[in-house]
Image (cartoon, rainbow, N blue to C red):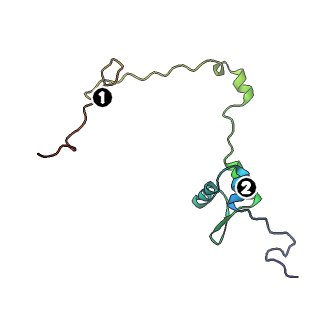
Amino acid sequence: MRRLPGTEGGAPLPRLYRPEEIAEALGCSAWWVKDRARRGLIPHTRVGRAYRFTATHLAEIVRLHEERPRRSVSSATASPAATRPPTPRTRAAQPLGPTTAPATGRLRARPPRRTQYETVA
């Protein structure tokens, strides 16, 4: 019986998944998987011109795109700032120049530049 290369130690080769299978597991498109692999943003294996993925690659992709909470739940509930509504942001006063709108709070449209559209009679 003929053995595959790399299996002399008894360890089988890892199963290679196609981008479509990885996309189905992640709930995204195969195009996204191939694009990220092409850009080198996710781990993959190239077999000829084809992208292939192992189960370890899939776990690493999930870990790379994992989002952690910014604060822990216990510290967010204990802090009184978390229950207060956010304060409105105000813009710093800027000096009025020749191209700024008047201080009434309304915007004023500038006249259109018609020189590029005029025709010579």
Amino acid of disc 2: Leu
Task: Determine the residue located farthest toward the left in the rendered image.
Answer: 121
Question: Residue at image x 71%, y 49%?
Answer: 63
Q: Residues within 10 Å of mark 2 (few under 14, many from 20)?
A: some
Q: In the rendered image of this protein, does residue 66 appear above or below residue 96?
A: below
The alpha-carbon separation of the residues under discs 2 and 1 comes to: 53 Å
Residue 58's tag is 2
Q: In the rendered image of this protein, does residue 106 appear above or below residue 19?
A: above
Number of marks present in the image shown: 2
Q: Earlier in the sequence, mark 2 or mark 1?
A: 2
Question: Residue 31 location, x and y as percent?
Answer: 61, 57
Q: Does residue 4 appear to the left or right of 117 in the view shown?
A: right
Question: Residue 32 location, x and y as percent?
Answer: 61, 54
Q: Nearer the viewer, residue 103 or 19?
A: 19
Q: Classify mark 1: helix, strand or loop.
A: loop
Q: Does residue 51 appear to the left or right of 118 in the view shown?
A: right
Residue 36's tag is none
Q: Nearer the viewer, residue 64 or 102?
A: 102
Foreground mark, 2 or 1, reads 1
Amino acid of disc 1: Ala
- Specify the quadrant of the image occupied by residue 35: bottom right
Label 1 belongs to which residue? 109
Question: Residue at image x 73%, y 55%?
Answer: 58
Q: Classify mark 2: helix, strand or loop.
A: helix
Question: Residue at image x 59%, y 61%?
Answer: 38
Question: Residue 74 location, x and y as percent?
Answer: 75, 26
